[in-house]
Image: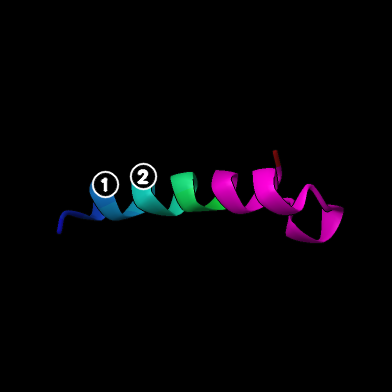
Amino acid sequence: IYPTNMKLLLIILGLTIHGINCSPKYDLGG
């Protein structure tokens, strides 16, 4: 797995978590 793909997966995962929880505690700066 390339670092760029890993970073993209982390971004998508972060957005998903933020979308599900919708809480400042899980806000990754977005």
Give the amino acid at mark 2: Leu
Contact (Cβ within 8 Å) of mark 2 with mark 1: yes
- Residue 26 lies left or right of residue 8; in this view the side is right
Name the outermost residue toward the front. Answer: 20
Q: Residue at x 15, y 59 (%)?
A: 1
Position of the C terminus, as image quadrant, is: top right
**Residue 4 badge:** 1
SS for callout 2: helix
Q: Left or right: 26 with respect to 6?
A: right
Local crowd size for mark 2, using a 10 Å CA cut-off: few (<14), some (14–19), many (≥20): few
How are the colours assigned in the image?
Answer: rainbow
Q: Which residue was labeled with disc 2?
A: 8
Task: Please tell me which residue lies in front, 7 or 12.
Answer: 12
Left/right of residue 22 with respect to residue 8 in the rendered view: right
Based on the picture, tell me whether residue 21 belongs to the magenta stretch: yes
The mark closer to the camera, 2 or 1, is 2
Residue 11 in percent (x, y) is at 47, 46
Residue lying at 73% horizontally and 58% vertically, measured from the top left: 26
Residue bounds of the magenta highlight: 15-29
Say which quarter of the image contains residue 2: bottom left
Residue at 74% x, 54% y is: 21
**Residue type pointed to by label 1:** Thr
| Outermost left residue | 1
Residue at disc 1, secondary structure: helix
Q: Position of residue 8 (x, y in %)?
A: 36, 44
